Image (cartoon, rainbow, N blue to C red):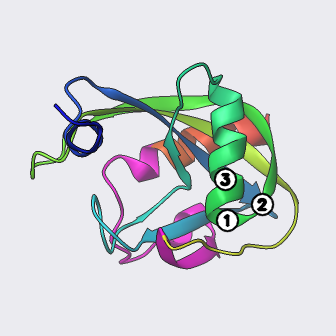
Amino acid sequence: MTAVAAAVHPRHPQLAVSGAIFRDDKVLLVRRARSPGKGFYSLPGGRVEFGESLHTALHREVDEETGLRIEIVGLAGWREVLPATGGGHYLIMSFAARWAAREVVLNDEHDDFSWLSPEGLGDLKLTGGLQDVIAAARRLIQD
């Protein structure tokens, strides 16, 4: 198997991180510009690289995707994702975090963002389990 094929179709679950980032009691949601989950709003995050701690991965991914600096508060939960399209197998560790510095500048992985009240997610297309992760993260932020 070539390195390209391995990157497209991993043969084992991929470890990932995401951050429910709060600022003034609003959480940051980003809309995915490509698959998996194209058009869905979710939290910034991505794969953990070999030898990288979960916190280091989250800081790196948030910086790459949004340009923000954050303060990680704690683990809000985890979710196993098996996309129906056969697009992989992910274990996502989701953390509660506070905005610390900078304004959002999206990379090409996302095409929209919004700071929203957790009660105001309305009719947005959300990734599975997102509301539960946001609720758990909010509890950690408020403690």
Q: Picture coordinates of residue 115 (x, y %)?
A: 66, 72
| Amino acid type, callout 1 | Thr
Residue 84 percent coordinates (x, y): 10, 49
Looking at the rendering, the stretch of residues picked out in magenta corresponds to: 109-132
* Residue, far left: 85
Q: Secondary structure at mark 1?
A: helix
- Give the alpha-carbon distance from disc 1 to disc 3, as whole Å: 6 Å
Q: Are marks 1 and 3 in contact (CB under 8 Å)?
A: yes
Q: Residue furthest top?
A: 51
Residue under the point 59% across and 71% down = 107
Question: Dot 2 lies on which element?
Answer: loop
Do the residues bearing badges 1 and 2 touch, measured as CB atoms within 8 Å?
yes
Mark 2, other Cα within 10 Å: few <14 / some 14–19 / many ≥20: many
Neighbor class of circle 3 (other Cα within 10 Å; few <14, some 14-19, many 20+) is: many
Which residue in the structure is indicated by mark 2?
A: 68
* Residue 127 visible in the snapshot: yes
Give the residue at x 62% y 36%. Answer: 95
Left or right: where 47 falls relative to 20: left
Task: Indicate which disc, 3 or 2, sits on the residue closer to the N terminus.
Answer: 3
Q: Considering the numbered disc 3 on the image, is that residue within a helix, a strand or a loop? A: helix
Residue identified by numbered label 1 = 66
Horizontally, is 94 left or right of 61 in the view? Answer: left
> Do the numbered discs 3 and 2 sit on residues whose CB atoms are within 8 Å?
yes
Image location of residue 28, percent across then percent down = 63, 64
Q: Is residue 113 magenta?
A: yes
Quarter of the rendering containing residue 40: bottom left
Let me know if residue 74 appears in the view.
Answer: no
Say which residue label 3 marks. 62
From mark 1 to mark 2, how far is it between C-alphas?
5 Å
- List x then y, in percent, for residue 64: 65, 58
Answer with left or right where residue 135 lies relative to residue 102: left
